[in-house]
Amino acid sequence: MIRFERVTKRYADGTLAVDDLSFECADGEITVLVGTSGCGKTTSLRMINRLVDPTSGTILVGGEDVTKSDPAVLRRNMGYVIQHGGLFPHRTVIDNIATVPRLLGASRAKARARAYDLLALVGLSESMAKRYPYQLSGGQQQRVGVARALAADPPVLLMDEPFSAVDPVVRGELQHELQRLQAQLHKTIVFVTHDIDEAVKLGDKIAVMQVGGHLVQFDTPERILARPENDFVESFVGTDRGIRWLSFFAAKGLELRIPATIETTTSADEARRIARDASTDWLLALDAERHPLGWLEVAALNGGASIDLAGLRSLGHTFRPDDDSLRAALDATVLSPAGVAVAVDDQGSVVGVADHDEVTRAIRAASGRA
Amino acid sequence: MALLTGIQPGALTFHFHKVSDWAWVTSHIGYFWQLSRTHLYLAFVAVAIGLVLALPLGCLAARVPRIYPPILAVTTMLYSLPSLAVIAFLASSVTGLSDTTVILPLATYGLAVLVRSVTEGLNNVPNEVSIAATAMGYRSMRRLVTIELPAAVPVIIAGLRVATVSSISLVTVGSLIGIGGLGQLFIAGENTDFPTEIIAGLVIVAMWALIFDGLFLLSGRILAPWARRAR
């Protein structure tokens, strides 16, 4: 456990970087420090491994005051990942990863063997081992950075905007990868970012900080989105915080109904009859495995013979009630031409649909409970 | 010029008035080799002394930025002193007609070039690399020696190339006080009105400069294979 007790950092020129900060990072959880630039989040992180020492207050790691420890020894027991990786340009990937085991006295062979395990753990192939950092993409460099931080199996991992220099697609992959690793390793992670989406996605707890080094709110992501402490937090989490908040509610609670469907062999006349019986303007087209193909607009049908499958309207996307959130379901209704979200099972077969009204009802029910 | 009394023209046996005399050149290969050895010895001792002094000074200047401008001012001022004047002064008063008289100013020039390379090389090491090294648990001396200096090697080698080439060229001035090296070919050629000897001296000096420049370039590629496309 990492505990900040009334920690203040004032620089020699009088600037207050961190102001009377107190909070706790629980073991095995990801605590995200989030805020605009100049809010003291990086300074706070760096006080944990003594890259910066506090002016007053105490930081306890596992009950020990960090300022009482030898900084080099302390740091070897904490992983550290920064923006751009900070990889050593003159060392190969494998020797970068082997850095801390070597510092802790492991033989070169032992440290490298360990480094190969980590290379695999972060999803890089062995063919990368002998490359130099400049030969890697930004995303690969960050993976090596994470592997290097984990090499000595430290209980604590400090991450300073590790994914902010890569493009959004790679960032998403790296975030997912971190979640996967964390589910396996249960490290105590302190993660700094300026991106509230990243904070909400990764954090078990979020500390929102404001310029001047104030901690404004320390809470779970759900509560930060649902009940921002003040105007600053509210504006920081953005105008679509309500939509984001929905990602914490499972789509399981939706009451799905069985839609009116057609198959690829259904004739236009039959389709009109099905639509009339169900009193709907839209029919869901399915293939033989009940995979959804798209929406058929009854008004657009010509003649009485076969249906032109090329004229089907796109589904937008489907959602899976067992895994997805209400956010995904709502998004699916918004994108659907019929205003109806299509739910599928793991095989991609349709299990039911939910319209705007049903999604709205589920949102009301869920937020009422929250 | 009293200084020129040290010249030994005895090595010269032919006095042709042709611009180039290939036969003379081929018959003196052994002599050129002997002069080259002295010449390169003086040049490299000077560069080595320059490097040995530049490393700690450059590291210090990179660590304490405040002292970099004064170090730069002093070394640049020394660099700007005309070598001939310095050698004449040292020869007549301090170190006399010895190797030291030649090596001392050349080492100073090497120092001026190299202190800049070492400092700039270290300053060019990306900040996040130094921070990462510290955060991994390196103590400052080990970080300097195993992370920062190796990362600065490409810039330091670039400085070594400049220092070596200029040192090889400048050793010739030592001949004015009779200190060995290929410069003696210039003096003797001038005294005996024999251009072939002067041209031979020029070509050989240029050749050594090119060879060692190339060797340093190559050693850079070998020592820092990672730098080929970095930055």
Image (cartoon, rainbow, N blue to C red):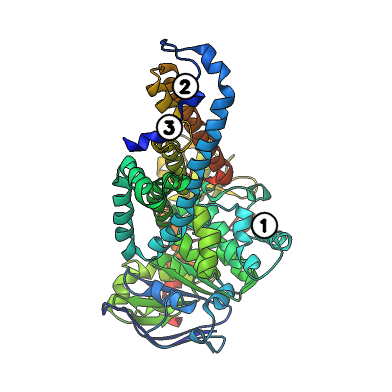
Residue shown at 59% from the left, 25% from the top: B30
Q: Residues within 10 Å of mark 2 (few under 14, many from 20)?
A: many
Amino acid type, mark 2: Ala
**Percent x, y for residue A235?**
29, 71
Q: Residues within 10 Å of mark 3 (few under 14, many from 20)?
A: some
Residue A313 lies, with reference to residue A204, above or below; the image says: above
The residue wearing badge 2 is B200
Numbered disc total: 3
Q: Chain of mark 3?
A: B
Looking at the image, residue A55 sits to the left or right of residue A171; the answer is left
Between residue A96 and residue B184, name the one nearer to us.
B184
The residue wearing badge 1 is A120
> Quick one: SS at disc 1?
helix
C-alpha distance separating marks 2 and 1 = 62 Å
**Percent x, y for residue B172?**
42, 34
**Which of the 4 image quarters holds residue A100?**
bottom right
